Amino acid sequence: MIVARRRPIEDRPFLWLAPLFLLLATLYLYPLIDVTRLSLTDATDAATPAHYTLASYRSALGSSEFVAMMQVTGIFVTASVAGQLVFGMLIAALVCEGERRRLPGAAIVRAIVLVGWVLPGVVIGIIWKLLLDESGAGIMAYASSLLGARNPMFLSAPLPALVWVTIANIWRGTAFSMIMQYAGMKTVPPELYEAATVDGAGALQKFRYITLPMLRGILLINVVLITIATLNTFDMVLPLTGGGPGRATEVIALYIYHLVFSEFQFGRGAAVAVVLMLIGLALSACYARMLQKERAA
Amino acid sequence: MTGHKPQEAEQEPKLPLPPTPSRKGRGSFGSSSPSSSHPFPLAFSPSLLRLLSPRTHRLLGSIAIYAGYIVVSTIFLFPLLWVASLSLRPMAELFAFPPHLIPQHPTLAAYRDVLIGSPLALYLLNSVKLVSATVLCALAIAIPSAYALSRLRFRQPALKSLVMLGMLAVQLISPLVTALPLYRWFSALGLINSHAALILVYVALSAPFATWMLTGFLDAVPVALDEAARIDGCTRLQSLLRVLLPVMLPGLASTAILLAISTWGQFIVPFVLLTRGDLYPVSVGILDYQSSSDSVSTHLLAAAAILSALPAMLTFIVLQRFIVGALTAGAVKG
């Protein structure tokens, strides 16, 4: 073995990775640094020069608007994640059990759920807007009139609007959780269930003591990923409510956008964007740790 | 219900450690458990169900599963069907009371009006251009990167996992965060409203994901294959292009499909970096269309929504098996 010889140039990984690194450095890494820099300025719009100051953070994070927005975002994210996780798990269990019994149709159900996930977010927003139309053309308005409710408010009152935006987001994201957990359930050895059946365990016990512990790793990863995805939600809310009524459904991404492009508070918007980035980075770090644990297991 | 059973079950999962799943667990469920008739996880009162004969028991379980299938399919299909129904109605039927899911006088007029009388066709064309350029460029960058990560030895192995994890983190930060400084630069450089610049940003957003997926697919190809090619005198590049790429064509295809679907739905970046309506991709264009429409043109908006979702939906439906396979593989591997 000759160690001292130079490696041939084609054996060097960084040569092959150079285009990717170059692209990410200019269009990803540097913007992240730059947004941090901008968050420390009093920039107003794209063109004007700015001075360095910490006032952006003070005014952005100290305002009552920010607190209200974080509350809205918190409710939206928590409820979405819980809903997607639970419905994803139910559907995954349903499809798995159907496949185990060799009942035809499991693949079709799986595909139908996934279609919602494939649609562009804007289209999902428009679809739900049409469903929830409060005038005569809305089917939900018709359905609630059958139940005796006159002039129902779906998107025009603050609390219902937040509820429906969350429901639409659960509708959108359930497919991803379903697919992850479906894949996880497929790796559980069937022998475990057989042994439990022999010992007389019921279905709920099997779920509690076999499926859940075996899925633990995947569930944690799933939670992190859908938390991040929900936190970054922007495209679906815009056509659905635009953040309204008032600011009742203004989640963090919409808030940043409004600060920068409607209120021309670039520095303050960047400060909130840095908050979003830090939450994303923290969750990514969690994700990375879990992934390494999963691999080690 | 007997009292001691939960304790037995509690010890159950500890028995078959270590938890390395046997390969059997992946495909043939039926053959390894033909006799078990427990309705996991649907029966909620096992004690009652045990009174029934195993056959009735099993039948009830299957009926419950199909009931579940119907509920789930309705929840996920109904919104789409409703919008499709709106898009097929003449204007007079929009406010019909009671509403019918199946239009009484179905017409394709809304589609014709939207395609001819609005810029939607242009938006669709823009999207097709942006998506195909992005997929091609992202693959061109991701293929050599994936080769390096799968086949080449890193001096410090820790560096390799750092690269892999870094690429993962990149996907998890909202594009809105990077779009803000990009908007400033592009304004200063006169690159706002440039499709080429937009494609570069798209590629930066999708190349890490493509690299991550392709690395997984390459790892599954035996090294012996490209070693044989190199013994025959191929350079690494030749072995990649002539030997590895043809073998991993299915992997390339599913990566391309997933990239295309996600780029088709890409919204924030074009929303921020484009200001000229005639350059909009369909995701931004349809929002513009929505804000200019009113309740008497609901059928037009519905037709526009269907049209802008159709390419992604068709791609998905036709290539469904591919995609689900790629997704589940990715989910297990991470």
Image: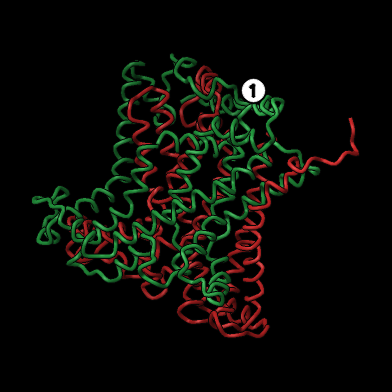
In the rendered structure, the colour chosen for chain B is: green
Q: Residues within 10 Å of mark 1 (few under 14, many from 20)?
A: few
One can see residue A163 in this view: no
Name the residue rendered at 35%, 68% in the picture.
B278
**Which image quarter holds the C terminus of chain A?**
top right
Q: Quadrant of residue B127 in the image?
A: bottom left
Q: Quadrant of residue A291 in the image?
A: top right
Name the residue rendered at 57%, 36% in the picture.
B332
One can see residue A207 in this view: yes
Q: Chain of mark 1?
A: B
> Which SS class for mark 1?
loop
Amino acid on which disc 1 is placed: Leu
Does residue B285 sit above or below A283 in this rendering? below
Residue B33: x and y in percent read 47, 16
Q: Answer left or right for B82 relative to B23.
A: left
Chain letter, red? A
Residue A111: x and y in percent read 37, 38
Q: How is the image coloured?
A: by chain
Name the residue rendered at 66%, 78% in the picture.
A40
Which residue is labeled 1 in the image? B15
Q: Answer left or right for A152 relative to B230.
A: left
**Which image quarter holds the N terminus of chain A?**
top right
Residue A90: x and y in percent read 42, 39
